[in-house]
């Protein structure tokens, strides 16, 4: 049986609080079925991720991007994954620019990559149906976590994926953490180890997001396998079926 692939993406340029919450989410994801899940973590630390330059190259070259940096490596990991968990620091009440750069380029380049599936003029994005969970980590309370989570949920929807949250009441639309005005990269870990209430909630919420994302994906994939015949004639499902249950 194919293992479920879970990709955790830490969107911080440093190895800090976002990565700490991601690690909890990934541990919880793995624990759902240790032998049936393959977890992989990716960090934006020391990565170069420039913006889309709107050159149109990807449209004509099978989705390849003309900007040569770390984009293609992460794109391939993202495409292989069944579950993606983003853990991003809040920057200016949203996600860091480098994460947005990746998302912008991913969305546009996939039109070019999957163009061959559709008749000319009817290009679309295939229904990839990955499950996407989100964590947004800030320094203050109510300082952009929900905006950031909403941006990631919108990204999931645009990419024809399925956004999930954790459990009520800790995770309304994803995990939102804060470090009580501490800037240190280990702030959240220290606060958690000192049993600070908000840090405990952030960790619980991150773990819920990881666990529920994997559970949802297992359920979804059972349905996809059961309904393969119904889905197969529609090209919009081809990359999904090739990934989960190839002919
Ligand atoms: C450029 C920049 C902008 C930031 N903007 C916000 C913000 O709008 N809201 C907030 O809560 N924290 C903001 N922060 C703080 C980080 O989100 C916070 O320190 C977080 O814990 C960093 O995560 P990391 O340790 O994974 O890098 C900002 C930090 C930087 C460097």
Image: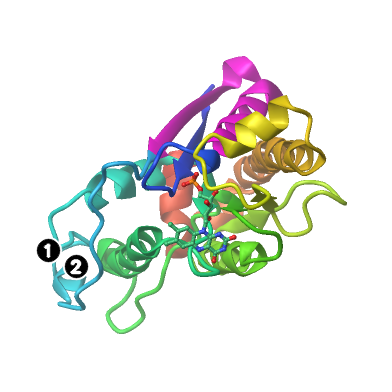
Is residue 29 magenta-colored?
A: yes
Q: In this view, does 11 lie to the left or right of 57?
A: right
Is residue 107 magenta-colored?
A: no
Q: In this view, does 91 lie to the left or right of 164?
A: left
Q: Position of residue 35 (x, y in %)?
A: 59, 15
Q: Which residue lies furthest to the top in this view?
A: 35
Specify start and end residues of the magenta stretch as a single range. 20-42
User: Residue at point 59% right, 38% down?
Assistant: 187
Name the one closer to the observer, 196 or 202: 196
Q: In this view, does 173 lie to the left or right of 123?
A: right
Q: Is the magenta stretch mostly helix, strand or loop?
A: helix
- Callout 2: SS: helix
**Label 2: which residue?**
58
User: Residue at point 41% right, 52% down?
Assistant: 239
Q: Do the residues labelled 2 and 1 touch (CB within 8 Å)?
A: yes
Vertical placement of 63 versus 229: above or below?
A: below
Vertical placement of 162 versus 120: above or below?
A: above
Name the one closer to the observer, 70 or 66: 70
**Residue 29 found in image quarter:** top right
**Label 1: which residue?**
66
């Amino acid at each position: 049986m194919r293992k479920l692939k879970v990709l955790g993406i830490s969107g911080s340029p440093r190895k800090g609080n976002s990565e700490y919450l991601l690690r909890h989410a990934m541990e919880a994801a793995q624990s759902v079925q240790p032998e049936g899940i393959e977890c992989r973590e990716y960090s934006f630390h020391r990565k170069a991720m420039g913006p889309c330059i709107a050159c149109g190259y990807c449209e004509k070259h099978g989705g390849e991007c003309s900007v040569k940096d770390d984009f293609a490596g992460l794109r391939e990991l993202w495409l292989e994954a069944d579950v993606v968990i983003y853990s991003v620091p809040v920057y200016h009440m949203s996600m860091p620019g480098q994460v947005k750069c990746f998302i912008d380029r991913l969305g546009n380049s996939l039109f070019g990559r999957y163009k061959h599936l559709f008749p000319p003029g009817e290009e679309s994005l295939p229904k990839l149906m990955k499950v996407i969970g989100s964590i947004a980590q800030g320094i203050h309370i109510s300082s952009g976590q929900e905006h950031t989570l909403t941006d990631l949920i919108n990204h999931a929807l645009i990419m024809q994926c399925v956004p999930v949250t954790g459990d009520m009441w800790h995770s309304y639309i994803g995990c939102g953490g804060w470090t009580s005005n501490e800037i240190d990269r280990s702030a959240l870990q220290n606060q958690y180890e000192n049993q600070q209430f908000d840090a405990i909630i952030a960790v619980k919420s991150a773990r819920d997001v990881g666990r529920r994302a994997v559970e949802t994906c297992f359920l979804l994939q059972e349905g996809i396998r059961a309904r393969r015949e119904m889905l197969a004639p529609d090209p919009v499902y081809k990359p999904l079926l090739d990934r989960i249950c190839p002919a």
